[in-house]
Image (cartoon, rainbow, N blue to C red):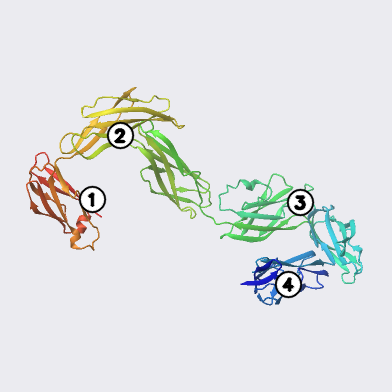
């Protein structure tokens, strides 16, 4: 929408274009809810008034509170120009204390203010707080004290509220010792007061053995709402007997364990077997007279050479995998310290065979078969699980493979020997052997062997070919002769020679050498062949021997040439083309072909030999040309032949046969 205003000024009329758009506004961005006590109120809320000061309707596209403790309720989503909607933001305190500020982001289609942040801020106080509320001193030796523990009490209040203090501490001086270390009193942010008392707590163990001791330390205040704060303490007392550890965490791993850790006198976290040691501090002989453990934990007594100590060995032995917990009860012959309870926890992983293969791949590099007649590798296979491992070879490909053991016991190893014979092999080698296992996580493993067998010589292309040439026309062909040699050897340089055929001439190019970092080198020589075609009509062949200096360790391959020499016979068309589609009409399965001579010499075609599915009929004949009709009688039969050809037999002694290709497209 565009508003056009026209008015006059001293300099004449002017035009002002104003684009109408929505514009969001709010009565206040942040509401301060002051200082409140946790528990006095559970939440605070405030209503924000959103207005549209623009010329187009304003759409509120979303409200996004900064945390899950805040809720935002919008009275309406669309605000007309000049209209007002409300947004009620509510902040639930839950366990929040200290300064809190939450945010609600309002999104709209106002192009200048697409997002607007509204906030609630204030201070949430907790009148009394004790941290920690419990001290566990663990196991103490008789007539000793525990290590230092700290307890802190914090009191928060509004500046205009009554001030309270800690007025006393009640505890048993025989069992514990309490000392005030520090006390502070301060005003924070000019909004509230905070007092802090920090106490040192020590537990005093009695002279006698005790499996469980506890005491409540009471801090007294002058506040009627919270007259006391309680600190719970608990501990155990060891007398003459030292028992450790008081908790065992066992793990029955899926991996094989040879039990070497069982010789340790203490617990072995991560092992399925661990020990609890009972030792007499006075050196008196001690025995375990009773030992029980919650299933699936199994316990037995282990003694040593010294009579003042004995062990309880615990093993996690479940039927199924999972998490387990229980109690180990140790009964001794000590006159006072007769019984101890040890907490047991365990986890059992599935028991199964686990196949471990350090490597399943071997690369033998680039080699010469006459120097390295075979490539082999012995692979190591280990059973890292707790059940027997079964192995079978599924396929060997072009390799020889021998498995030493078909069954591997837990913790044991076996080997797989693989060999590839490289005699009469050239080029890249990539073979693999497939081994099947009863490990559900790795039921199939491919052991691969890879490398490359280098030829001593190679000619590219292996055959130099010329198709459909005529006598006397010079043909120029090129071949690349490559040789491979050990890097400390001298390559053979090709020498120009005289072919047996006078119509063939060779040009030997410069030899280019290169050396790899793998112990071998390569040399390339380009040979240009000049051919003056001759011979009988049809296919002709020639072999050109090559020589070099120094004399090559391996014979240098010859150059092979092939050329097709044309006579006077020609055909129109040169090839007969039919459509492969079976739905074509009969006219598409019939063609005509004319056989003629370039020099118009007379000739006669005695017969036409056609492939299966094709019929050839003579239509017309003159002294120097003959017309034939070629018809497909069975398209499927014709399509099943790789290279169908019609052979026309003539009375010409130099060209007794003339072939014509049939193509299917």
Distance from the alpha carbon under mark 2 to that under mark 1: 30 Å
Measured from the top left, where is residue 474 in percent x and y?
A: 23, 33
Reading the image, the residue beneath label 4 is 89
Spatial CA distance of label 1 from label 4 is: 83 Å
Res 366 → quadrant: top left
Disc 1 and disc 4 in contact, CB within 8 angstroms: no
Q: Residue at x 71, y 67 (%)?
A: 10
Q: Point out the tag, 1 or 3, that comes first from the N-terminus.
A: 3
Q: Dividing the picture into quarters, in which one does residue 74 lie?
A: bottom right
Evaluate if marks 1 and 3 touch, with contact meaning CB atoms under 8 Å apart: no
Label 1: which residue? 642
Q: Of marks 4 and 3, which one's residue comes earlier in the chain? A: 4
Task: Please identify, in this view, whether the residue under mark 1 or under mark 4 is nearer the observer.
Answer: 4
x, y (%) of residue 265? 68, 47
The total of numbered circles placed on residues is 4
Q: Which residue is mark 3?
A: 242
Q: Nearer the viewer, mark 2 or mark 1?
A: 2
Give the residue pinned by disc 2: 478
The secondary structure type at the circle numbered 1 is loop
Which structural element holds mark 3? strand
Quarter that holds the N terminus: bottom right
Left or right of 105 in this view: 235: right
- N-term-proximal mark, 1 vs 4: 4
């Amino acid at each position: 929408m565009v508003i056009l205003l026209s008015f006059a000024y001293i300099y004449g009329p002017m035009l002002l274009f104003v684009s109408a758009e929505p514009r969001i506004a709010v009565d206040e961005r942040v509401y301060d809810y002051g200082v409140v006590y946790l528990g006095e109120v559970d939440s605070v809320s405030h209503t924000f008034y959103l207005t549209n000061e623009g010329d187009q309707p304003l759409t509120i596209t979303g409200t996004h509170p900064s945390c899950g403790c805040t809720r935002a309720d919008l009275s309406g989503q669309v605000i007309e120009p000049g209209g007002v909607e409300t947004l009620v933001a509510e902040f639930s305190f839950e366990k929040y204390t200290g300064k809190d500020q939450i945010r609600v982001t309002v999104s709209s289609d106002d192009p200048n203010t697409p997002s607007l942040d509204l906030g609630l801020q204030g201070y949430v106080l907790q009148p009394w707080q004790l941290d920690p509320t419990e001290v566990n001193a663990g196991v103490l030796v008789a007539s000793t004290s525990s290590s230092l523990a700290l307890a802190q009490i914090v009191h928060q209040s509004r500046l205009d509220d009554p001030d309270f203090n800690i007025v006393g501490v009640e505890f048993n001086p025989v069992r514990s010792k309490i000392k005030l270390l520090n006390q502070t009193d301060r005003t924070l942010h000019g909004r509230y007061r905070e007092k802090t008392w920090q106490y040192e707590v020590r537990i005093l163990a009695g002279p006698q053995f005790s499996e469980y001791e506890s005491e409540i330390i009471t801090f007294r205040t002058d506040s009627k709402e919270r007259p006391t704060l309680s600190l719970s303490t608990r501990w155990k007392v060891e007398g003459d007997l030292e028992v450790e550890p008081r908790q065992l965490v066992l793990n029955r791993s899926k991996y094989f364990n040879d039990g070497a850790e069982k010789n340790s006198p203490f617990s072995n976290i991560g092992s399925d077997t661990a020990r609890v040691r009972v030792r007499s501090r006075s050196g008196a002989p001690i025995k375990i007279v009773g030992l029980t453990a919650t299933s699936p934990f199994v316990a037995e007594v282990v003694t040593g050479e010294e009579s003042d100590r004995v062990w309880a060995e615990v093993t996690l032995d479940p039927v199924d995998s999972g998490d387990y917990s229980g109690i180990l009860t140790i009964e001794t012959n000590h006159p006072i310290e007769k019984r101890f309870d040890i907490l047991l926890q365990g986890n059992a992983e599935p028991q199964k065979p686990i196949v471990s293969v350090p490597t399943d791949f071997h690369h033998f590099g680039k080699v010469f078969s006459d120097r390295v007649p075979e490539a082999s590798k012995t692979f190591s296979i280990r059973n890292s699980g707790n059940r027997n491992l079964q192995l079978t070879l599924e396929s060997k490909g072009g390799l020889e493979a021998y498995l030493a053991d078909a069954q591997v016991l837990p913790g044991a190893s076996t080997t797989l020997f693989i060999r590839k014979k490289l005699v009469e092999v050239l080029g890249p080698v990539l073979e693999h052997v497939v081994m099947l296992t009863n490990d559900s996580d790795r039921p199939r493993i491919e052991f691969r062997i890879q490398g490359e067998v280098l030829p001593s010589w190679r000619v590219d292309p292996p055959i130099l070919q010329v198709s459909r040439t005529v006598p006397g026309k010079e043909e120029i062909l090129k071949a690349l002769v490559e040789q491979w040699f050990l890097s400390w050897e001298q390559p053979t340089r090709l020498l120009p020679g005289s072919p047996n055929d006078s119509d063939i001439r060779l040009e030997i190019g410069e030899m280019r050498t290169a050396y790899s970092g793998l112990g071998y080198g390569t040399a390339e020589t380009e040979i240009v062949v000049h051919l003056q075609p001759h011979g009988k009509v049809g296919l002709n062949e020639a072999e050109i021997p090559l020589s070099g200096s120094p004399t090559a360790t391996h014979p240098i391959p010859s150059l092979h040439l092939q050329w097709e020499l044309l006579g006077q016979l020609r055909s129109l068309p040169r090839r007969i083309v039919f459509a492969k589609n079976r739905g074509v009409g009969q006219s598409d399965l019939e063609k005509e072909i004319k056989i003629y001579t370039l020099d118009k010499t007379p000739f006669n075609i005695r017969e036409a030999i056609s492939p299966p599915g094709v019929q050839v009929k003579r239509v017309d004949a003159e002294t120097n040309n003959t017309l034939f009709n070629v018809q497909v009688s069975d398209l499927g039969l014709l399509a099943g032949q790789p290279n169908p050809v019609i052979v026309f037999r003539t009375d010409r002694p130099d060209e007794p046969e003339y072939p014509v290709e049939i193509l299917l497209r």
